Image (tube, rainbow, N blue to C red):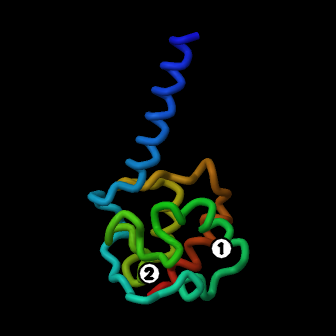
């Protein structure tokens, strides 16, 4: 029984580490490099998004990219002006495949969900 508890504790630590490293601030993530817009609220950041996109963002993106899109893990996770740096197709690829510290969501999101998020994000200029 004691050994089982040790394994469970180790698994919990690994899960936390995997979550933290998914949002590494020193990554070379393609979404990165955005400028912070001081004072942008979550409501302002969500302008132009459907209820579906808002729900998808809150469930899958919020933990690393913040409610106002400024990024929680440094400027490389800032999405406020991602449409100036990436096309919709590039954003879809990044969402699905991940890379540079971002996990891929291909198995978690349907293609049409990734496309809906990408269309909205591509409008952020």
Position of 24 with respect to 82 (left or right) is left
Report the residue at 34% width, 70% height from top. 32
Q: CA distance from mark 1 to mark 2?
A: 15 Å
The one nearer the camera, 35 or 111, is 35
Report the residue at 47% width, 51% height from top. 103
Disc 1: CA contacts within 10 A as few (<14), some (14-19) or many (>=20):
some
Sequence-wise, which precedes: disc 1 or disc 2? 1
Secondary structure of residue under mark 1: helix
Check if mark 1's residue and mark 2's residue have beta carbons within 8 Å.
no
Where in the figure is residue 66, as x and y percent of width and height? 48, 70
Report the residue at 32% width, 67% height from top. 74
Position of the N terminus, as image quadrant, is top right
Q: What residue does disc 1 label?
A: 54
Where in the figure is residue 109, as x and y percent of width and height? 64, 56
Position of 119 with respect to 18 (left or right) is right
Up/down of 71 relative to 9, above or below:
below
Position of 45 with respect to 55 (left or right) is left
Q: Residue 80: which disc?
A: 2
Where in the figure is residue 6, as x and y percent of width and height? 48, 19
Position of the C terminus, as image quadrant, is bottom left
């Amino acid at each position: 029984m004691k050994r089982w508890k040790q394994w469970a504790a180790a698994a919990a630590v690994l899960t936390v580490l995997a979550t933290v490293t998914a949002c590494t601030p020193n990554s070379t993530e393609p979404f990165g490099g955005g400028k912070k817009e001081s004072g942008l609220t979550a409501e302002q950041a969500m302008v132009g998004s459907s209820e579906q996109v808002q729900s998808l963002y809150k469930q899958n993106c919020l933990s690393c990219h913040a409610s106002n899109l400024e990024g929680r893990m440094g400027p490389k996770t800032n999405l406020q002006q991602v449409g100036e740096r990436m096309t919709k197709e590039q954003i879809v690829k990044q969402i699905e495949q991940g890379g540079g510290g971002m996990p891929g969501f291909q198995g978690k999101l349907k293609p049409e969900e990734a496309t809906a998020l990408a269309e909205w994000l591509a409008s952020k200029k």
